[in-house]
């Protein structure tokens, strides 16, 4: 087996790339309706990630997860004011942060337990 060495770590050929899932998909549906007193809008967003490895040695793995986000809003006809209700991560998915210090993907709960 061929091995490459980078910064004191060995990467064997055939191992998965870090932080890249084999399959990721997002489906989004929007609905907008004009009413005499304003505008009604709704959004549903569903995301799937097949999981990824956090390290080049493939020891830490993010398990597959699904995230469902919902929102409903009512606004004035001239768009000067809007009231919005939303729910993020309605399926309560646990996923790990990508390590950059930024927010978790798609608003899922950042928990170490998300790793296998």
Image (tube, rainbow, N blue to C red):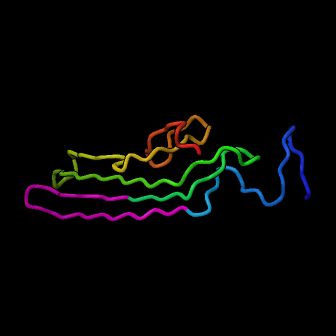
Task: State which region is magenta.
Answer: 24-45
On whether residue 34 falls in the magenta region, the answer is yes
Question: Which quadrant, please, contains the N terminus?
Answer: bottom right
Using the image, determine if residue 24 lies above or below residue 93. Answer: below
Between residues 81 and 11, which one lies in front from this camera angle?
A: 11
Q: State left or right for residue 37 relative to residue 71.
A: left
Using the image, determine if residue 20 lies above or below residue 102. Answer: below
Residue at 84 percent across and 41 percent down: it is 9
Q: Main secondary structure of the magenta part?
A: strand
Residue most extreme to the front? 116
Residue at 52 percent across and 38 percent down: it is 113
Residue at 18 percent across and 64 percent down: it is 33
Query: Looking at the rendering, which quadrant does residue 43 occupy?
Result: bottom left
Q: State left or right for residue 52 relative to residue 46.
A: right
Residue at 50 percent across and 63 percent down: it is 25
Using the image, determine if residue 101 lies above or below residue 91. Answer: above
Residue 92 location (% of width, % of height):
38, 46
Between residues 93 and 1, which one lies in front from this camera angle?
A: 1
Using the image, determine if residue 81 lies above or below residue 33. Answer: above
Residue 23 location (% of width, % of height):
57, 63
Residue most extreme to the left? 36
On whether residue 69 falls in the magenta region, the answer is no
Q: How many marks?
A: 0
Q: State left or right for residue 58 relative to residue 66.
A: right
């Amino acid at each position: 087996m061929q091995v490459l060495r980078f910064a004191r770590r060995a990467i064997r050929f055939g191992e998965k790339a870090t932080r890249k899932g084999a399959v990721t998909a997002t489906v989004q549906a929007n609905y907008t309706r004009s009413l005499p007193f304003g505008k009604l809008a709704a959004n549903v967003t569903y995301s799937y990630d097949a999981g990824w490895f956090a390290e080049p040695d493939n020891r830490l793995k993010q398990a597959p997860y699904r995230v469902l986000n919902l929102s409903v809003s009512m606004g004035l006809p001239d768009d000067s004011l809007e009231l919005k209700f939303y729910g993020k991560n309605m399926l309560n998915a646990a996923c790990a942060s990508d390590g950059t210090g930024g927010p978790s993907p798609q608003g899922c709960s950042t928990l170490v337990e998300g790793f296998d």
